[in-house]
Image (spheres, grey):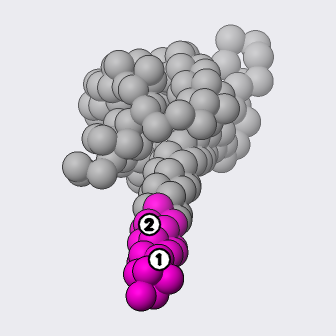
Amino acid sequence: MGAAYIGLIGALLGAVTALAGSVLSVRLQARHERARWVRDRRQAAYDGALRYLLRALNRRSELAVSGGRMVSVIAQEHVRETFDDLVEAQFWFRALTAACGDRQLERIQKAADDLDARVASLSGVGASQMPNQLGQELGETLRVLSECAREDLKDNGSGGRRRLMAG
């Protein structure tokens, strides 16, 4: 009878150990999946913000002579596309404030606010002035975004996960 109890206790101990291992494995897998989802979301937000900001900054329709030099300009028919790209960049910057790491949050929020202000300031700008003004005013935003992306994407930490999961 003693051997039966020992066998029963051994079987119960083995079952509990297997169950605990299974639960731990599922939790680790879920944590890994969540971290990968956050990383992918962060990557997508940086990609979108960079893509649309660069599209707006680099759209050129024609060349013109101004002050004896050749300058690129946006033709009137392409102004709407440029504004559409800027609005997309604004969207991705706001998505990025939810997805970026905690160390980048303040810089990204300031860059997003600056982008909003710069886009609002373009309302009275003519098509021929747009490329020069965009290049001058948005260059700093692009620099900050690139630096944040480089630092944030090399950092595999979980910074920003709480904001992303809550939002």
Question: Can residue 156 be spotted in the picture?
Answer: yes
Q: Which residue is mark 2?
A: 20
Q: Position of residue 105 (x, y in %)?
A: 37, 25
- In what quadrant of the picture does the N terminus appear? bottom left
Residue depicted at 46% across the width and 37% down the height: 158
Q: Residue furthest front?
A: 1
Q: Amino acid at mark 2?
A: Ala
Residue depicted at 43% across the width and 32% down the height: 159
Q: Which residue is mark 1?
A: 6
Q: Position of residue 96 (x, y in %)?
A: 41, 41
Secondary structure mostly seen in the magenta stretch: helix
Callout 1 secondary element: helix
Q: Residue furthest right?
A: 69
Q: Is residue 101 above or below residue 79?
A: above
Report the front residue among 67 and 7: 7
Disc 1 crowd rating (10 Å Cα; few below 14, some 14-19, many 20+) is: few
Say whether residue 6 is magenta: yes
Residue depicted at 50% across the width and 51% down the height: 35
Asked whether, in this view, residue 16 is left or right of residue 94, the answer is right
Q: Residue furthest top?
A: 67
Q: Which residues are magenta?
A: 1-24
Say whether residue 74 is magenta: no
Disc 2 crowd rating (10 Å Cα; few below 14, some 14-19, many 20+) is: few
**Label 1 close to label 2 by CB (< 8 Å):** no
Residue depicted at 30% across the width and 51% down the height: 165
Asked whether, in this view, residue 82 is left or right of residue 165, the answer is right
- For marks 1 and 2, give the CA distance: 21 Å
Callout 2 secondary element: helix
